[in-house]
Image (tube, rainbow, N blue to C red):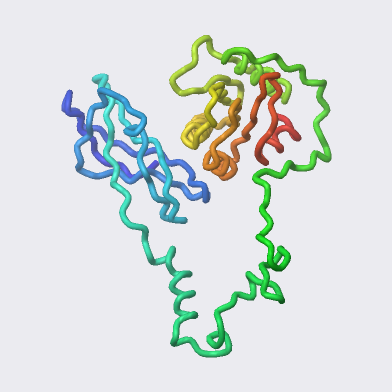
Amino acid sequence: MGDQVPVRCPVCRRTHTFAAPVFPCACGAPLAPPLMRGAPAEPIRHRTWTDDWVTVRCLACGRQDQWPQPELGCPCGTVLRVPVRPVTAAPTSTASAPSRTASASSGPASSGPASSGPATSLSAAGPHGSPTGSPSGSSPVERPAHIPLPRTAPVPRPTFHPVTIRTARDAVTAAALYLRWLGFQDVVQPEERPASGIDLRGPGLVAQVDPTTRPATLRAVECLWLNGLSSSSVSVFFSLAGYADDARARADDLGVPLFVMDLTGTPQPVNSPADELLSAGS
C-alpha cells in the first residue's frame, strides 16, 4: 500500500485513514498515486471517464501513465474521490544525464580525434557511411509490428469449431469457446455486461470482447489488465476491429494477449503474449 493519509467525509464528518493501492509499473517497480495530505476529499455524484483517471509518474523509470483515481467508500454510503498530487516537470537528475553527456562530448571544448572533422556516429553508420543493416542510398528496413513465434511444441488439441458472428453476443460466445479450447475451465459469461467491461470469467481468467467497429483503445487494455491484476488472473482481449498502436504497445509491455476475430468467429493472435498462450494453452 502507498502512504497513509487522513480523509474526512464531508457528509458524515467521519475521518478515515486511507492508502492508495500499489500497482506495478511497466518497468516492474511498485507504484501508487501520490496522495495530497490535507486536501479535502470530494463526494462523487456524477462519474466521467476523465475524472476516473489520473496521471502518475514512476520515480524509477520516469514513465508517465494513466492510473485509476483513488476512491474511498465511507460507511455512510458516500464515495469520495481522494486528491492526488499533480505531475510536475520531469526530473533532470537521471533522465537528462545521457543527453548532457552527449552534448558535452560534442561541444567545442572536447578534445581528441573524436572532436575533429564532421560528427559521424560509427555505431549508426556502416563502413561506407550508409546506415547499418540497409544498403547505401536506401531507406532503413522497417520491421513488422508482430512476428509470430515458432510453435515447435504445440499443445495437442482437437480442431477448433468456431461460430459465425452476427451479433455482439455471438462475439462473446465465440471468444468463450476459444478460451475453453485453449484449456480454460468453467468459462462463464454474465447475462448482462457488467460496468467493468469484463465479458468472460473463469478460474484464473478475465477476458474482454470488443465487438465494435473501432480499434480497441489503450485505456480498454489497461482496464482489463488492472482487473486481472486485482484478481491474480490472466487477462485476454478479443477485438473485431483490431487495436490502436498505443494499445498494442502497452499490451506487449504488460503481457496481455491480444486476439482479433473475423466474422467466422476464429480468433488470431496479434502479439507475442497471444502467440505464447496459443502455443502453451492455459
Q: Which quadrant would residue 178 be assigned to in this image? A: top right
Residue 211 location (% of width, % of height): 56, 21
The structure residue drawn at horizontal position 55% and vertical position 79%, both measured from the top left corner, is 119
Residue 165 location (% of width, % of height): 65, 15
- Furthest residue toward front: 137
- Furthest residue toward top: 191
163 horizontally vs 72: left or right: right
| Closer to the camera in the image, 35 or 200 | 200
Q: Which quadrant would residue 103 be assigned to in this image? A: bottom left
The quarter of the image holding the N terminus is top left
The structure residue drawn at horizontal position 50% and vertical position 34%, both measured from the top left corner, is 217
Residue 106 location (% of width, % of height): 49, 80
On screen, residue 55 above or below 155? below
The structure residue drawn at horizontal position 65% and vertical position 18%, both measured from the top left corner, is 176
The quarter of the image holding the C terminus is top right
On screen, residue 155 above or below 33? above
On screen, residue 209 above or below 82? above
The structure residue drawn at horizontal position 64% and vertical position 75%, both measured from the top left corner, is 122
Q: Which quadrant would residue 59 be assigned to in this image? A: bottom left
- Furthest residue toward bottom: 112
| Closer to the camera in the image, 201 or 220 | 220
| Closer to the camera in the image, 174 or 236 | 174
Residue 48 location (% of width, % of height): 33, 28
Q: How many marks?
A: 0
140 horizontally vs 89: left or right: right
